[in-house]
Image: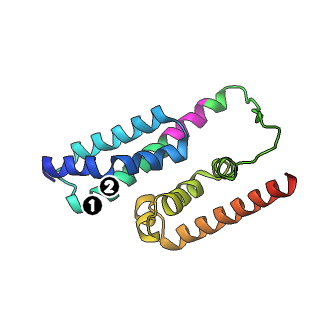
Amino acid sequence: MTTKEYNNTVENFSDKVYRFILKNIKNEDRAHDIVQDSYEKLWINKKAVMYEKAKSYLFTTAYRTMIDVIRKEKRMNFTEENKIFEFGHENQYTDLHEVLNIAVQQLPEIQKAVVTLRDYEGYSYKEIADITELTESQVKVYIYRARVFLKNYIGKIENLV
């Protein structure tokens, strides 16, 4: 990959990688750091990465880095006392988008990642499988399970309101 191709990659994919990471971890600073780390790794390996594969490389690298950050945070939180956080809305939600975001955050990490890639970013099952190193069948199963959970969660909220 040449420097010009690297710059094109930065211009074309930075926003998409950032949105994917931000949607999963909900922290702008960490999302920026993960994207920056991914581009740093791409720069270091630019001779080994073909330009046509740069997008897949970036998403895969960002995904793995995000998982590492999440695991590290869980280890750190495990040593601290567990605290219970309550929502300030007293379970009265009027914004379906807000309810959906809360529901997505309750999904297991892998389901959250595949749903975000498929439904928010529009990637194919094959591309998601390449990024997450799962088979296409596993991707479809995780997406199905996540959608069932989201449907049930939103259905329960609508019954309560």
Q: Which residue is at a point 72% across and 26% down the rendered structure image? A: 81
Q: Which mark is residue 57?
A: 2
Q: Which residue is at a point 75% across and 57% down the rendered structure image? A: 153
Q: Position of residue 9 (x, y in %)?
A: 25, 51
Q: Nearer the viewer, residue 22 or 68?
A: 22
Q: Position of residue 89 (x, y in %)?
A: 78, 37
Q: Position of residue 151 (x, y in %)?
A: 72, 63
The residue labelled by disc 1 is 53
Q: Which residue is at a point 45% across and 39% down the rendered structure image? A: 31
- Asked if disc 2 and disc 1 are in contact, CB closer than 8 Å, the reply is yes
Say if the magenta span includes residue 74: yes
SS at mark 1? helix
Query: Which amino acid is tagged 2?
Result: Tyr
User: What distance separates the C-alpha of mark 2 from that of mark 1?
Assistant: 6 Å
Query: Which amino acid is tagged 1?
Result: Lys
Q: Which mark is residue 61?
A: none
Q: How many marks?
A: 2
SS at mark 2? helix
Q: Which residues are magenta?
A: 69-76
Q: Residues within 10 Å of mark 1 (few under 14, many from 20)?
A: few
Up-down relation of residue 25 to residue 83 (above or below): below
Up-down relation of residue 148 to residue 24 (above or below): below
Q: Residue furthest bottom?
A: 137
The colouring scheme, among rainbow, by chain, secondary structure or one colour, is: rainbow
